[in-house]
Structures are given as structure tokens and as C-alpha cells.
Amino acid sequence: MPSTTATRVYPLSEPGDSEVRLRVQALGLNRADVRWLANPNIETPKLPARIGHEVAGVVEAVGAGLMAYKPADRVTSLLCKQARLPVMLMLLALLAGYADRAAAQATAQAFAKPEVVQPFRVDIDQKRIDAILQRVRTARLPRQMPAMSAEKAAWETGADIQWLKGLRQYWTQQFDWRAAEVRLNRYPQYKARVDGVAIHFYYVKGEGSNPLPLLLTHGWPGSVVEFLDVIGPLTQPSKHGGRAEDAFTVIIPSLPGFAFSGLPADVSFWNTTARLWQKLVTEVIGHERYVAQGGDAGSEITVLLAYHYPRSVKAIHLNLVPWGHIPPDQQTPEEKVWATNGDAFMAAEFDYLRLQVNRPMMPSVALADSPMGTAAWIAEKFYAWSDNHGDLDKTFSKDLLLTNIMLYLLSENGVEGSFRLYRAIRDELRWTFVPGRIEVPTSVALFPREYPMGRPPLETAKRWYNIVRYTPMPRGGHFPALEQPDLFVTDLRESFRSAR
């Protein structure tokens, strides 16, 4: 289970250095560390190379998102002797207590309802990681079915088996989940209980005196991983080629049923999530007004927020435009082309959606105990929907893809938890993606490899939205924060400048 608090101690020895170095990386001790400290006869644990090369002696209250304490750079060799344990544990108890208090104080200061919020860190039991890796090693991959023609890639059949073999080799021999955890834990995370649902989210304050609160919502088959690389530029623009006055305070929740968020008890997903997001931002965190951005499922949530809570949502930004129905006899010539292209795309590419909407338990059973199956199911969409020119690895690293895939495998909700939103497209939304006229100022970034129907002509989008900015992008696809982070960040800064 991921721990909400942890202070881990890594006893480190660098080549040619006989002195022990410590790096305390959040709040609490794990058993292996305690055993090593207590018994000098136990061999020093094998530690990831990334830790051995880090600067030692840094204590970070990561849960609180701030630097709490910087002890001496070295712990002298005296602490390496038999008497080291009492001294070390005394120091660690002091530091852990300090960090606990710092986290509690920071939480109390950061949120309007601190009593429903807990600091959170990703810290998965190694047994769970080992179990996944064992299933990956023993998975039987099928033979590749031939593509329709020599011009078609193997992905056209639904999976590129040769690529999956390479992924498996990397996954079992090179991928380092602990390094992924460090990346996931780089920014402060929390869990808040909102209307009985545990919501996992990042909350990172921006620089300056008045950063604009920005709610970012991911979709399927993505996760909060999509936004990790844009948190810095959005919250600290002066350090990334921007202006301090363009800073955002970002709120990035995991959708219900995804990663470390819980699932509502009822079958509603879309309007329930919009309500949970509104309460999270305005009641739990305490921002009366904010702006919102989304793509894929996140775009629908963003539209519902704008529709139901226009007094709170100052403006929205979409990289996929939820579309409405236009009777054929009312379509303009340009709209007829758009609708025809959209229908063709859905006929060719939406087989997964029909399954996840109408028979969600079929893929759920197939994928529940198959990490390789889950990886194939997710990776195919990253290939089909991104601007990759036929080479997935040039657009997304295997480390990034596997980190995202692991969040599905490690979720207590299982991969089936992420299918809840698809069933609700039919039963809750009834295939109606625009609930009514959206008067909140709406900006759109049109990435060329996005769904055709998610890129309607400007005049078509104006049928449903108060469009204030409509920007064709030179490149990029369905995952713009990952594919084109600079374009994504720049467009957000410019789109929301008038909302400050």
C-alpha cells in the first residue's frame, strides 16, 4: 500500500569513501533500513545507482512540498561503529518528528479544510512490483498477424508484437520503478475525502503574489503522469523562459477509478466527477475561482464544470472539443466534411470504445491479471493517437509509458476502474457531450493528430461554446502535454492571461 508519510534512510557508501552518507527522503523508516542500521554484520543493501550519486544529507519534507532541514554533508566514521544505532535513531526520530510537524503545518496552511486532506507519497511494496514483473516474464505473446498490406504497420492489427517483446525486455531488465516513484513524488501530493470519495491529487503553488489556480484533468489511457513535465513551467515560469506574472497554482487530480483515487458508490461518473472537482478546488483547497483545462475525458469534465459552475470557472482550455449533434440538413459544407471524417475515424479506431462502453467486463477479465495485455491495450492507443510518424519510441520513452501503465496495474480499482467512465457515456451522458451552451470563455488548441471530430471548424465550435481563442498547432496529437509540452504551456499562458 502507498504510504501517506515516510522518512526513508539510505546508508550510502561511494567508491573510495569510507564514511557513511545519509539521505533521508521524506518521512519514516522501512524495515530493511532499520535492520541494516541495527546490525553492522548485515551486508550493505544494493542501492539504485541514482541514489549513490545524489548529494547526501538532505532531509526533505516532501509531503509538505518544502525543504525542511539540511544537516551536515557528512556523517563521520564514528557513526559507522557499533554505537551508531542509538545516535542515528535519535537523529532520525528528531528529523522525522520535525518533518511530520512540518507536513501537518503546511497542510493546515494550504487548505481550507485540512481535516479531510492527508499528504501522500507513492511507495509501493516491492512484493507487488516483483509479482507484476514475474507475470511479465512468463507471459506468452502471440504470433504477429500480418498487416493488411506492406504499407501498413503491424500496429494496424492492434499490436506490434516485436515492439511488445522489446518493451518486455526493457520492463524486466532496465525499468526502475523506484526511479519512477522518485519522479512521481517530485511534487507534493495529497489525498482528500470529498463526498466520501478519496481523491488523489497534486497541488503545487505557483511563484509570485497571485498565481492563477489551474485545474488540469487527464483522460484515458493517460494519468497524472501526462502533466509532470509541465508543472515546473506552469508554476515557475520565470525559470522556464516565461514571466513570473504568468504563474499558475496547479491542481492535478487522478480521475475517480484511476491510480490512487477511489470510486464513487453510484454509477454516475461524469457529473459526479465535475461535482467532486468543484468541491475539491473551492471547498477543500479554498480557491473561490479558477480556470480549467482538459483533453480526452478531461475535456468533458472541464466542459461540465464550465456549464454547472460558471461562477467559479473563469475560463476553460480544451485540446479536444466535445461535440454536439448537428442534423445533416443543417450542416454547412465544411461541417459535412468534418462529420464524414469523424465518422470514418470512429468506425476505424473506436473498437476499444464499443467494448469499454457496452461490454466493459470482457476486457476487464482479460486484462485483470495480465500486465502484458494491459500494456498492449494502452500502448496501442498511444501509438494510434499521437503524432509519432510511425515510431512510438521517438515520441514517448519506455520509462514514461511504463510509469503510466504501472499506475493502472497498481491501482486498487484495477484497470476495470478506468472503464467506469465509458459505461457512463451510454448510461449517464447518453452520448450527449455538450450539456448546453457554454458561456464561459473557451480557448482551444487544435493539435493535428487529435481525433478529427475533436477538431471541429471554428464556426461549428461556436455553435456550442463562447470561443475566444482557436489556435491550430503545427504538430502534436492526443497527449499534448507529453508530446509538445512547450506548445501546450505557451498556449495555456496566453489563453488564460485575460482571466487573471
Image (cartoon, helix red, strand yellow):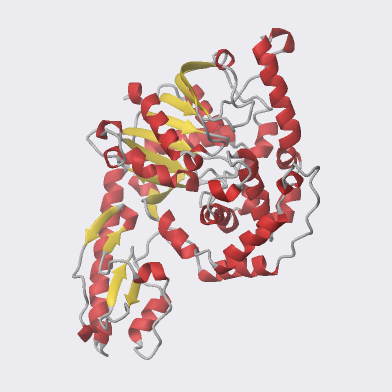
Q: Residue at x 59, y 37 (%)?
A: 269
Q: Is residue 56 above or below residue 226?
A: below
Is 295 positioned to the left or the right of 3 in the image? right
Q: Residue at x 55, y 52 (%)?
A: 401
Q: Position of residue 122 (x, y in %)?
A: 45, 58
Q: Nearer the viewer, residue 210 or 86?
A: 210
Q: Quadrant of residue 428?
A: top right
Tell me if residue 247 can be seen: yes
Q: Residue at x 44, y 62 (%)?
A: 179
Is 154 positioned to the left or the right of 37 in the image? right
- Residue located farthest toward the left when viewing the structure as drawn: 72
Q: Position of residue 106 (x, y in %)?
A: 27, 50
Q: Nearer the viewer, residue 77 or 96?
A: 77
Q: Residue at x 55, y 48 (%)?
A: 394
Q: Is residue 353 above or below residue 289?
A: below
Name the quadrant of the C terminus.
top left
Q: Position of residue 293 (x, y in %)?
A: 46, 32
